[in-house]
Amino acid sequence: MRHCALVLVFALVAACGNGAPPPIDGSELPVEWLRIGTHRISAEIARTPAERNRGLMFRESLPTDHGMLFVFQDDRVRGFWMRNTPLPLTIAYADAAGRIVHIADLEPHVETPVSSRYPARYALEMRRDWFRDHAVFPGDRIEGIPKSSPSGS
């Protein structure tokens, strides 16, 4: 009996892995766990200008509770567009503390930028209506944001 319990414990530890989110097929970006309130999100982290410019272009789908976090070096009004992006998305702009300052819907393939209205250091794109469906609003905080690096200008 003791042997069975040990085997079960080792199996559970192996199944949990190192706690890192699963990689996303076709993405070369690092993936981190984020949290907004009680909601856990796996997010690809786009830090460099090239990574941010590519964003979620050409993606046909996103896994449940998965998105992309765009990390910048400074706080300023940001604008995002949907060139070559077929997915309907919602974006949450957040300040340096991770506090959401604005949430907006993004229409597939529309190249008119959608502004953050307020200075933002981060932008989190999720499937359309994810924030509404999870009762996430401006003023809520994104936790677990990795620190920006000097190369992420």
Image (cartoon, rainbow, N blue to C red):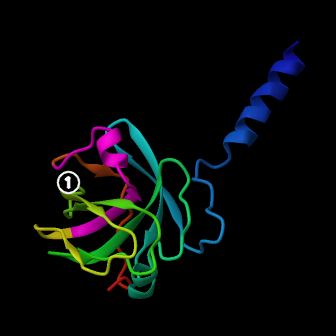
Residue of label 1 = 99
Q: Nearer the viewer, residue 4 or 89?
A: 89
Give the residue displayed 44% in from the left and 43% down from the top: 40
- In the image, 59 versus 75, the foreground residue is 59
Residue 2: say if magenta: no
Q: Quadrant of the N terminus?
A: top right
Q: Amino acid at mark 1?
A: Arg
Q: Position of residue 59 (x, y in %)?
A: 54, 70
Q: Position of residue 84 (x, y in %)?
A: 45, 80
Q: Tell me where residue 27 sits by quadrant.
A: bottom right
Q: Secondary structure at mark 1?
A: loop
Residue 76 placement (x, y as % from top left)? 15, 76
Q: Is 69 drawn above or below residue 131 in the view shown?
A: below
Q: Is residue 73 left or right of residue 146?
A: left
Binning the other alpha carbons within 10 Å of mark 1 as few (below 14), some (14 to 19) or many (20 upward) gives: many
Magenta stretch holds residue 122:
yes
- Please identify the quadrant where the C terminus is shown: bottom left
- The answer to whether residue 9 is above or below residue 2 is below
In this picture, residue 29 sits left or right of residue 52: right
34 sits left or right of 102 in the view: right
Say which of 68 and 57 sits in front.
57
Residue extent of the magenta highlight: 121-138
- Identify which residue is drawn at 47% across, 70% down: 86
The answer to which image quadrant residue 105 occupies is: bottom left
> Which residue is rendered at x = 23% and y = 60% of the image?
104
